[in-house]
Image (cartoon, rainbow, N blue to C red):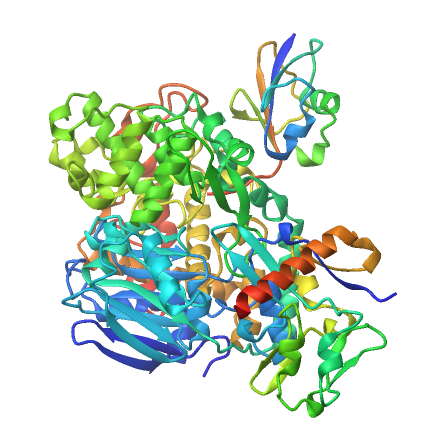
């Protein structure tokens, strides 16, 4: 038994309804830590990368890290790792809330879900006792109804993850939701859960977790806490204004993708900014477990047609449901976010898919007859309406539920898909942030900002400012960020700590918790090992260098106006450099020497 | 000359009375530098982390401002 | 005069670091279900209340304990459990009007102010839980807090 880990995983064959408890392998834990890393190793061994992601042959792993459930700063996270139905690549989506810690108190680091049930099921885990119940009565309920029902029946002490109608109906970007508003959002992990007919997992744990060196761990936590409190961003900024504080800086820098990346500035940005959210709809901040930052927003739209209350919106969401669709009505954006939470789907892909459809509509490719309504940029009511239709696969929503890559392809305009590897890019136009271009192109789960957040140095000047309009040095920084994030996603800690602390502090918490003698260098090397293993999975799934690219618009249509006017992304130069620095060949394949050095 | 000043996040408290949510027009002498503007508004240099002039990052606080330009200033911010 | 825990519920964000470090301090492991401080969370109403012992001057738990297992620490003014004397009767639990003593696994568990350096306070980033002179807590705010604790305790028993 290793300190800080619960020490066991729960393997569930949903086809036969057999449940087994297995020990966590200490050697694998040392090399892949937990969370994203250990789950990726297990998925790679269990699942052929070419399986249909929505078939019983796929496996879905919900994995905590060793620091999940301890007092490590922001250590309340878990990852959902599987082959993604949106991308066909490895998917690993991070989630906060309360579920991860509770799973560990119940005695498990991970839940490994295999096969598929023939009828809807509910899994109830209570301190090592595991039961599968028929869940026909829950099937069809939205996430909030499901949580309310289960809390009523089982008690409020149970922590829950569930899918909504979007997951049940295999919307390719369905999410797994915890605490009504916390999502393992991207790549369609909720559709995989739906394909297995698992509606929800309820967990209650009264056990505890010990660490290897309690005084050392306490000191490491207090050191990190002091740095988080002293940092302007983590100490005050995120709690006061949420992540949408970024809206104005990204917009003024001319890289706030607007109307499906046609423009880089949104004339109404301020109406959907963090400052406006704080003034108009914020009820109070809410944190995940063990998080002193508290970026979460409990909000209420107090009047008008979108009157309601819920969680969010955060930055990427106000962009996807706002600027990308040209919508400036904060009430509508917020309401559309609530609908995504309730139906259980990723706000980024949902909004970006509607934005793509809006461009197809304005180009005359889609007609009112196709869509069943007008679908023009800026139509707030249409965005809210389409969220509901997508999540329920009603009418044209059934088409959009496939994601914008497939929509653009279907209507003969694949170049209007604004993403990578069939996953939509989030809220930064790389024509004016070059490092984000190489990040999007190389991300192992396609269009994504949280594999290597180049916005921090290129726009925000954290830890120091890099020139956003040059390719120089971007591959190198991006690789370091990608490795750091892969390791961080494996220990159970939130990415936002990296605004104030780095590998030395994280390795110190990990070492004193687990007793494994990690230092900052080994921590980063574990991240590199995980990144390469994910890459190998994708290669076996059939992806090649040609998939490491960006939409034509970003490579050959200069930004039309603003500070980034005239720029396109010089991707080839950065990509060549990236492969070389990664120790990969010209086709983007890890060399034998690199794999040997990483022990893969 | 006239300069548009935009202050965000916690820096909004340094906006002159009667400003909009995040911006104000300020009349300055020709040759005013970024650091002079910060002084005029009472913003401590240490918390003016990001300064954009017409959307372009400006590291040099002694840069002279031009008539009609927009100066946007943030404390350290993050998100994503 | 000894310091006391001073609670400002409106500053709480539900991170529950207080529960985590309190349980580690008291139990040697991270086990929030055994924490002396509990954060009551009503997500719908967005009401969060860190529930802590306020070390009553006339402490009913201490008065009603049949084995004199609860005693006042002269230095910190905390009412503390003498484990060897506790016979698991749970009378203290029902005597407490605020629901902040719990008998679990055969022992009464309550806040002992960590001997004068409360761990929850060390880890509370927002100042929702502070350790301060009683005079710093306005009477009205203190009564609002204790009234809310009492009503939450009554709701839990109902």
Q: How many marks?
A: 0
Give the left or right position of residue A436, taking residue A46 as reference.
right
Q: How far from the left and from the top, in percent, is residue A195?
A: 19, 59
How far across and how far down the image is residue C103, in percent? 60, 81
Query: Closest to the observer: A430 or A470?
Result: A430
In this view, the residue farthest toward the right is C1
- Which of the image's four quarters has the C terminus of chain A? bottom left
Query: x, y percentage for residue A542?
Result: 17, 54
Q: Residue at x 27, y 34 (%)?
A: A385
In the picture, the quarter occupied by the N terminus of chain A is bottom left
Residue C144, quarter of the rendered image: bottom right
Where, by quadrant of the figure, is residue C121 drawn?
Answer: bottom right
Q: Is residue A288 above or below residue A35?
A: above
Q: Quadrant of residue A127?
A: bottom left
Vertical side of B77 occupied by A542: above or below: below
Q: Is residue A347 visible?
A: yes
Q: Is residue C119 above or below residue A269?
A: below
**Residue that appears at 46% across and 63% down:** A492
Residue at the location (48% across, 56% down)? Answer: A494
Q: Is residue A37 visible?
A: no
The image position of residue A462, as x and y in percent, is: 56, 43
């Amino acid at each position: 038994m290793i300190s800080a880990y619960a020490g066991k995983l729960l393997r569930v064959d949903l086809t036969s309804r057999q449940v087994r408890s297995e020990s966590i392998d200490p050697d694998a834990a040392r090399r892949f830590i937990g969370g994203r890393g250990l789950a990726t190793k297990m998925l790679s061994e269990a699942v052929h990368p070419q399986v249909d992601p929505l078939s019983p042959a796929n496996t879905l792993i919900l994995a905590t890290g060793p620091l999940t459930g301890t007092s490590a700063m922001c250590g309340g996270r878990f990852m959902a790792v599987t082959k993604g139905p949106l991308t066909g690549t490895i998917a690993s989506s991070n989630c906060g809330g309360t579920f991860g810690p509770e799973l560990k108190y119940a005695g498990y680091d991970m839940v490994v879900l295999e096969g598929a049930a023939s009828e809807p099921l509910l899994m109830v885990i209570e301190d090592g006792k595991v039961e599968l119940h028929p869940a026909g009565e829950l099937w069809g309920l939205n996430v909030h109804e499901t949580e309310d029902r289960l809390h009523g029946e089982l008690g409020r002490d149970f922590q829950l993850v569930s899918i909504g109608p979007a997951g049940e109906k295999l919307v390719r970007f369905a999410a797994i939701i915890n605490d009504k508003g916390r999502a393992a959002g991207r790549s369609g992990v909720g559709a995989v859960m739906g394909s297995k007919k698992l509606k929800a997992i309820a967990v209650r744990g009264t056990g505890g977790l010990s660490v290897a060196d309690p005084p050392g761990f306490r000191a490491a936590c207090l050191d990190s806490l002091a740095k988080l409190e002293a940092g302007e961003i983590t100490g005050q900024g995120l709690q006061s204004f949420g992540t949408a504080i970024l809206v104005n800086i990204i917009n003024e820098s001319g890289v706030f993708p607007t109307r499906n990346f046609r423009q880089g500035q949104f004339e109404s940005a301020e109406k959907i900014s963090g400052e406006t959210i704080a003034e108009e709809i914020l009820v109070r901040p809410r944190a995940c477990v063990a998080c002193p930052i508290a970026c979460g927003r409990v909000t209420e739209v107090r009047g008008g047609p979108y009157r309601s209350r819920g969680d969010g919106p955060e930055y990427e969401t106000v962009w996807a449901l706002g600027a990308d669709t040209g919508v400036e009505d904060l009430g509508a954006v917020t309401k559309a976010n609530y609908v995504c939470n309730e139906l259980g789907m990723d706000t980024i892909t949902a909004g970006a898919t509607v934005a793509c459809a809006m461009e197809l509509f304005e180009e005359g490719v889609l007609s009112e007859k196709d869509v069943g309504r007008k679908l023009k940029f800026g139509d707030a009511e249409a965005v809210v309406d389409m969220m509901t239709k997508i999540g329920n696969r009603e009418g044209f929503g059934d088409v959009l539920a496939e994601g914008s890559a497939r929509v653009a392809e279907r209507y003969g305009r694949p170049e209007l898909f604004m993403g990578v590897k069939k996953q939509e890019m989030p809220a930064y136009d790389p024509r004016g942030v070059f490092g984000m271009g190489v990040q999007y192109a190389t991300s192992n789960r396609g269009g994504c900002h949280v594999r290597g957040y180049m916005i921090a140095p290129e726009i925000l000047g954290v830890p120091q400012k890099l020139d956003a309009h040059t390719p120089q040095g971007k591959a190198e920084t991006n690789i370091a960020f990608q490795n750091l994030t892969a390791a961080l996603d494996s220990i159970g800690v939130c990415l936002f700590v990296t605004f104030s602390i780095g590998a030395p502090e994280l390795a110190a918490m990990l070492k004193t918790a687990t007793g494994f003698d990690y230092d900052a260098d080994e921590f980063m090397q574990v991240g590199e090992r995980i990144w390469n293993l994910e890459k190998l999975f994708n290669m076996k799934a059939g992806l090649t260098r040609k998939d490491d690219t960006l939409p034509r618009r970003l490579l050959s249509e200069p930004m039309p106006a603003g500070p980034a006017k005239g720029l396109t992304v010089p991707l080839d130069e950065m990509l060549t450099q990236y492969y070389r620095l990664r120790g990969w060949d010209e086709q983007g394949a890890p060399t034998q020497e690199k794999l040997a050095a990483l022990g893969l | 000359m006239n300069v548009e000043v935009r202050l965000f996040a916690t820096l909004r408290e340094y906006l002159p009375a009667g400003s909009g949510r995040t911006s104000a027009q300020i009349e300055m002498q020709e040759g005013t530098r970024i650091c002079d503007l910060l002084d005029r508004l009472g913003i401590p240099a240490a918390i003016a982390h990001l300064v954009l002039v017409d959307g372009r990052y400006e590291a040099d606080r002694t840069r002279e401002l031009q008539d009609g330009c927009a100066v946007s200033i943030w404390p350290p911010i993050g998100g994503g | 005069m000894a310091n006391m825990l001073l609670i400002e519920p409106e500053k709480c964000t539900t991170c529950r670091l207080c529960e985590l470090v309190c349980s580690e301090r008291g139990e040697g492991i991270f086990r929030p279900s055994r924490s002396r401080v509990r954060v009551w969370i009503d997500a719908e109403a967005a009401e969060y209340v860190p529930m802590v012992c306020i070390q009553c001057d006339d402490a009913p738990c201490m008065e009603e304990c049949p084995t004199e297992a609860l005693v006042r620490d002269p230095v910190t003014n905390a009412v503390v459990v003498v484990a060897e004397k506790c016979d698991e009767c749970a009378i203290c639990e029902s005597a407490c009007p605020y629901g902040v003593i719990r008998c679990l696994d055969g022992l009464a568990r309550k806040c002992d102010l960590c001997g004068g350096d409360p761990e929850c306070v060390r880890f509370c980033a927002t100042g929702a839980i502070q350790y301060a002179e009683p005079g710093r807590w306005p009477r009205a705010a203190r009564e609002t807090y204790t009234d809310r604790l009492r009503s939450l305790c009554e709701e839990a028993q109902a």
